Amino acid sequence: MATHTKPADTYSPLYFLASLGAGGATVTFFMFLMFWVPHPDRPVPIFEDIMTAFNTGGPMMQAAIVIAWIGIAYFTFLNLKMLAWNMSAFSAFKQTDAYQKLISSNAESTILAMPLAMAMTVNALFIVGLVFVPGLWGVVEYLFPLALIAFAAIGVLAFSLIGRFLGRVLSQGGVFDVTAHNSFAQLLPAFAVSMVAVGFSAPAAMSTNPATVGISLVLSTFLGVTAILYTLLAASSAISSMLQHGTAREAGPTLMIVVPIVTVLGIMFLRQNHGLHTTLDVHGSDGETMIFLTRLLAIQLSFLGLGAVVLRAQGYFNDFVMGSKTSPGSYALVCPAVALSVMIQFFVNKGLVASGLIAKFGIAYWGVTGIAIVAQIIAIALILRLGRQHFSTQTAAAVPAE
């Protein structure tokens, strides 16, 4: 008798990255509204701004808004669907011997994909509220404390998981396999902390309550600095192992995990600067912001190049993306594409346009923005392709009895 299975039946916490990637795609569509829809006197566009732009704008503006609406709705739904599936699958996974083996190995850190995905979901839901809920801005000051509480709970979960992992590997000798540290997989905890940090920084950019802004600035700074330190330490120790043993093939996509970390922390710094400007009267120039974003983009392009070189040399795309092989770690490829798209949007609008180097909606503007859209399309294509690979039922013929 034939058997019906799908790769996702063999569970890994890395499948939380499927939810994360969908949430990231939601953010890429929000960038259309963020930078193309006028929103005077507000740091972000809200439902009323979007409807005004739709009713008064031309066909191109209306088309962009409709595409953004559809993209945000679909990928937020997919984000929630995949998060719910992962929570259920992870709960069942904890009852297996495979879980006990996982938490006794280097791969215990992959569980940090759970708070990472949860933090992204909170961000995605906030976007949905801004875009689809009329009158939300009138009560937004009451929502910020709730958001801070939600991110605090996710942060506690993340640090408890990190503490359990580091407590085990640093208190005992020989439990961490250095030879298996030949990738950037151990940067996943830093990514999770940075995602919580950017969530904490949102009220700094949008609230007018000094107490809320102050709490947001302090907590996001603490988490952001922690994420940077963890990234530097984990990456530096991994490089030596990769030089000795080569990069672990299935973990190859983690070489580009620095790209989303940089985007997330970059947005955190921009939000903090906005809060410092509006609430604490600390001013920075648009030229300084442009140079800051340029430096961040340079870091991202460097690690994108590194990852592309190694993955191509290993034949990763032919096997795990376009081929028949599957690996949950393939979902880590979505994050760099999403992060690059979002960073380029900020670089163009908050950097080049704001500093006066290019005109908004001019030829140069669309030329660079086109790169962001191409990266967005790649991310969406990866999400759809990997979804079919990992979650579509495959039929295998039974092996005849001897």
Image (cartoon, rainbow, N blue to C red):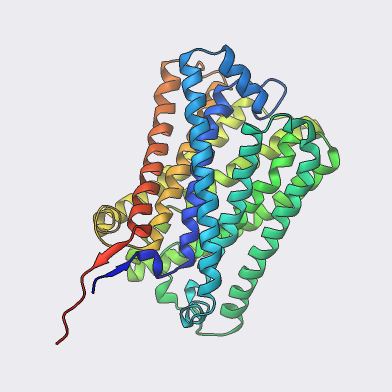
Q: 256 or 241: which is nearer to us?
A: 256
Quarter-of-image position of residue 150? bottom right
Name which residue lies at 61% across and 68% down.
162
Q: Is residue 219 above or below residue 157?
A: above
Is 281 placed left or right of 375 in the picture?
A: right
Q: 361 or 12: which is nearer to us?
A: 12
Name which residue lies at 53% across and 37% down.
72
Q: Position of residue 170 (x, y in %)?
A: 59, 78
- For the N terminus, give its image quadrant: bottom left
How many numbered marks appear?
0
Q: Position of residue 166 (x, y in %)?
A: 60, 74
* Residue 22 in sight from this viewpoint: yes
Is 159 placed left or right of 177 in the picture?
A: right
Q: Position of residue 79 (x, y in %)?
A: 52, 49
Quarter-of-image position of residue 350? top right
- For the C terminus, give its image quadrant: bottom left
Name which residue lies at 48% across and 74% down.
106
Q: Position of residue 369 (x, y in %)?
A: 44, 27
**Most distant residue in the bottom direction:** 402
* Residue 346 in sight from this viewpoint: no
Name which residue lies at 48% across and 39% down.
297
Q: 240 or 182: which is nearer to us?
A: 182
Q: Is residue 360 above or below residue 208?
A: above
**Most distant residue in the front direction:** 1
Q: Is residue 248 above or below residue 60?
A: below
